[in-house]
Amino acid sequence: MIDLAINGSYWFGALIGAALTVLFLDPKLFDVNVGWRYPFALASLLGLGVCIMRFFLPESPRWLILHNRIDEAEQLITAIEARVEASTKKPLEVLSSGISCILFSTHTPHSTASRASNFSKISFLD
């Protein structure tokens, strides 16, 4: 649902941007020499807002696992599950046990022997 809201909002933003362009470029509303500058200033403010918001958003568990920060990923998943259980007042259902994956480091030497030792097994559910 969140993915749909984020990806679907692109077209909503494009529609708003197109409408604002008509307003900003109207010589009756803004002087011709400055009207085109306002959208650039607005875009800069929005970009700055995105940069600031990045400090308040947690990393995704997928990113943490890929960067070998497995303990942090497990803590984040546990916290998310606890919030879901608290908001729904129902325990989460365990779909399967022993889900695991193989994580391969992309920064490995070229020899086959050392490459095999860089595989690590990660277990999500014990």
Image (cartoon, grey):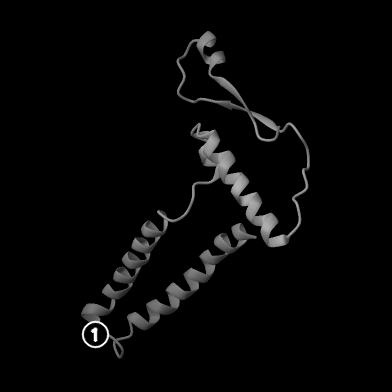
Between 29 and 97, which is closer to the camera in this rendering?
Answer: 97
Residue under the image location 57 percent in, 42 percent down: 75
Asked if 6 appears above or below 68 in the picture, the reply is: below
Placement of the N terminus among the 4 image quadrants: bottom right
Q: Give the image location of residue 36, x and y in percent.
A: 28, 75
Q: Residues within 10 Å of mark 1 (few under 14, many from 20)?
A: few
Please, which residue is most extreme toward the left here?
Answer: 33
SS for callout 1: loop
64 up-or-down from 117: above or below: below
Q: Which sits in the foreground, 85 or 3?
A: 85
Asked where in the image residue 97 lies, by quadrant, the reply is top right
Is residue 73 left or right of 17 when viewed as pictured?
A: right
Measuring 75% from the left and 52% from the top, which residue is drawn there? Answer: 91
- Which residue occupies 33% across, 67% down? 45
102 left or right, relative to 105: right
Relative side of 109 to 60, left or right: left
- The residue singled out by tag 1 in the image is 31
Q: Position of residue 25 (x, y in %)?
A: 32, 80
Q: Which of 114/29 is in front?
A: 114
What residue appears at the point 71 percent right and 32 percent down from the top-left corner? 126
Amino acid bearing label 1: Asp
**Residue 69 spot, x, y in % from top left:** 50, 34
User: How far across and how far down the image is residue 107, in percent?
Assistant: 45, 23
Marks counted in the figure total: 1
Q: Is residue 56 above or below residue 13?
A: above
Q: Is residue 101 above or below residue 27?
A: above
111 displayed left or right of 100: left
